[in-house]
Image (spheres, rainbow, N blue to C red):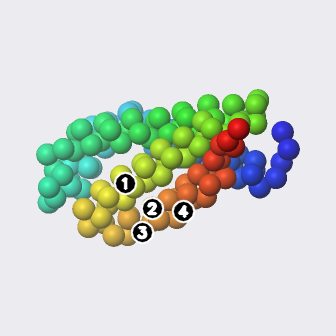
Amino acid sequence: MRFEANTLIPLFTGVFFSILFLQSGLDKVFNWKSEEEFNKKHFEKTFLKATVPLMLAVLTLMEISTGLLSVVGLFVMWITGETAILFYGNLLAATTFLALFFGQRISKDYGGAQSLVSYFIVSLIAIYFSFPALP
């Protein structure tokens, strides 16, 4: 594998998203009750309050899927040089950040929403550099 911007950026963002999303998703799995309680309180004054268990399950699935796609994508990139799986992982990362951003804005946690902007920008950069080459 040749190391240049179009390989280093997908490599590092793939590792970054693997760590970020697997840790966050697995934390939700292993601490489900406390995560659910936190989110019920976080969304208690919003129209989303009745959907917290479903919303938490979907978000957990999104996070674990993003982390796993990133890990698999890294191995595929390392072996074949192809970035298609990383690309789809990065698309899912951006989608996950948008879901989190939506929740933070609805709950009026503007500081939390603001902190997601830098992650979202990293996901957009990762999408750009992992876009698979067309034959």
**Viewer-nearest of labels 1 and 4?**
4
Residue on which disc 4 sits: 121
Quick one: quadrant of the N terminus? top right
Pointer 3 residue = 114
User: Does 112 sit left or right of 87 as displayed?
Assistant: left
For the residue marked with disc 2, what is the amino acid? Answer: Leu
Give the image location of residue 105, x and y in percent. 30, 64
Q: Distance between the residues labelled 1 and 4?
A: 14 Å
Proximity of marks 2 and 3: CB atoms separated by less than 8 Å? yes
Marks 2 and 1 sit apart, C-alpha to C-alpha, by 8 Å
Chain-order first, disc 2 or disc 1: 1
What residue does disc 2 label? Answer: 116
**Crowding at mark 4 (Cα within 10 Å: few <14, some 14-19, many 20+):** few
> Do the numbered discs 3 and 1 sit on residues whose CB atoms are within 8 Å?
no
Q: Do the residues labelled 2 and 1 touch (CB within 8 Å)?
A: yes
- Mark positioned earlier in the residue sequence (1 or 4): 1
